[in-house]
Image (tube, rainbow, N blue to C red):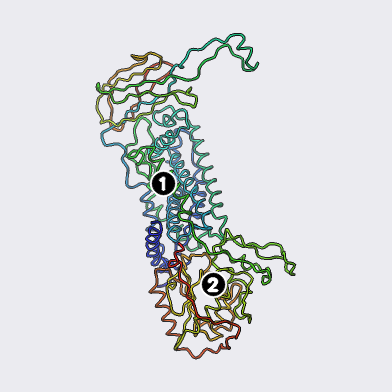
Amino acid sequence: MISVIRRVLRTVFESIEQPFDRLFGPALNPLAQLGALGFFFFWIVAVSGIYLFVFFDTGIERAYQSVEYLTHDQWFHAGFMRSFHRYASDLMVVMVAVHLLREFAYDHYRGVRWFSWFVGLPIIWLLYASGITGYWLVWDKLAQYVALVSSELLDYLPVFGEPIARNFISTGTLTSRFFSLMVFMHIAVPLFLLFIMWVHILRISRPKVNPPRTLALLTLAALVAVAIWKPAVSQGPADLARVPAEVGLDWLFLPLYPLTNIWGNGAVWAFIGAFSLMIGLMPWLPPLRRAKAVEVDLAHCNGCARCAEDCPYEAIRMVARTDGLPFPTQAEVNPSLCVSCGICMGSCPSSTPFRRTEDLKTGIDLPEYSLKELRERVVGVGAGLTGPGRVMVLACEHGGAAGRLDGTIVLPCVAMAPPSLIDFILSRDLADGVVIAGCAESAPYNRLGVKWTEQRFAAQRDPYLRARVPRERIATVWCSALAVNKAESEIAAFAARIANLPPNRLRSPLPVSAVSRPATTREPAELRGDS
Amino acid sequence: MSKALRLAGQFLVIVALFAGVAWLSDRPTYRQIPERSGVMMLTFVHGADRKGECRRLSPEEIAKLPPNMRRVQDCPRVRRPIYVELDLDGRNIYRASLPPTGIAGDGPSRVYQRFVLPAKKYDVAVRMRDTARAEGFDHERHGTVDIAPSQMFIIDYQPEDGEFIFR
């Protein structure tokens, strides 16, 4: 059931992401920057909030007046800031909601990712608490409604002796001290939210907390445009002698409030509890079945730290040498954080298929899909390629080419293939061209896999693809699992191009030691039933 | 597509999304009570009498107590429940026995009831029993109130004066 929902959601996301990718490009696609945009909106809210605080008065009568003053008399700066404050908060809710749905759709919440997912739950609570206390401060009709419904909800819990809601039903019961308390809450809760946001990304290597500059500028410009079109305003002063019968509700922050009228407070609490429980348990419903974690072979590890640098999951750290070899450090894997993507194997300088040994070893290897096995598959698949334009495809199991059968080797992540493997394929005449078919650039299954592959090929990141490898014989295809036709057509176009090229000059015979046993095509994760 | 045109397109898409979010920040409006209706609220916090009488401790019992906790009376903490009734135009719309709050049952009883009513005149009668008596009421108030549209009419109880107040 969950996998069906996930698949439907993934289809929805991918159909939205494709036009976004075309317009924005993978680097600027807002759907690939949801977390970073969430942080960005937080900072906009924080800065605008500090600015507004200069003008805000915590007096019972003066709270509303001060907000009116800054909105109308000082509209050209403070009024703008108010609009920024409100809309950036709303946008943060949208970012969090879409981020949550997207991570669910792409199955980025189970296995080692449980921690970030689980910590996201208090972020939702604190975000809502921050917004609700903010609406309270304006002390207009909406604030009165929010105050009454919030306190009635709190009164449902058997915690408070006297109903708090009694403070909001008649004049004379409320004092200025209350607004001082609310200001404190409205500062303390977001500060705590920021702390939890930091915890949320603690286990992520190189987290994106800032959107690309162009996207940030576009976002700011759009906020200015919206603030001009629809400035945030109050809804008339609160009057405790009257019921705020009709209010302009913020449906992003307060969607549950009307439900208290329809369902009752108990049912709303039950809904919040059930939602929280469901989100909290989802990483284990069902738990992700993982391949065995990578293993370090100290005899082939020189402590270069490239694997630790490239691991997107912080699963590898460098520790003091234990085997007496003359290197200061060695790699150490934390199996509970490893997703067996193989990116580290692709980064290891020892991972070279050119080694003239049958029992091919490397410094860090996947026990269930070793470098030796990868070389054997490459040799096997290469032996089966015939005719002009022989193309070998190294496909990500989460990308559009994962289901191909002919001339294809499926990998957990394309960054698992060391650049020397491409050199090996072409120089040993196993194929006339190589296609690296990864998953979508804007939604890679394993973070950084696409980026590292591109940087290695461009000789910007160790290990480099050697300069002698003819670049015209290599193609990269980045597309999602749904974009099978796109992947296929790009591969076919590349094969046609390759067929017209003059013979490859980079040829040397296959060493006898490289075992060429029949190729076995690795099935994609979906067919193996991993998810 | 030129860079400027592409940038303009990106800007327009983001503005459209943000405008949707801004619109949702106060539209569509929500009406919590029907038009031409008001709210009558019966709410108060009041502690009824304690269930048992205080008993004077004997000198021996006092002597057994730690020196810093010696007292002359032993009073049971648990309070009685409060019984409340509310009639509107002679028809009973609320009656409840309100237990005391607190783990030991020594806190005040509390009521917080909201009634959405069409705006018009009503004969209101509210009664409460907070003592050991089995029948009748200790506090009572009748009156005619005119509920205006969107009015918040409160029926409260002032323990200091021992009477209900309408406001």
At label 2, counting other C-alpha atoms closer than 10 Å, the crowd grade (few under 14, some 14-19, many 20 or more) is: many
- Residue A89's place in the image compared with A437, above or below, is above
Q: Is residue B144 visible?
A: yes
Residue B165 percent across, percent down from the top left: 36, 20
Give above or below for B48 relative to A199. above
Res. A253 mark: 1
Mark 2 or mark 1, whichever is nearer to me: 2
- Which residue is pictured at 56% across the width and 72% down the height? A455
Front-lying residue, B126 or A365: A365
- Determine the secondary structure under disc 1: loop
Relative vertical location of residue A415 with respect to residue A469 in this rendering, above or below: above
Q: Which residue is mark 2?
A: A453
**Mark nearer the N terminus (2 vs 1):** 1
Residue under mark 1: which chain is it in?
Answer: A
Residue, x 48% and y 54% (percent of image)?
Answer: A283
The answer for how far apart the CA atoms under marks 2 and 1 are is 41 Å
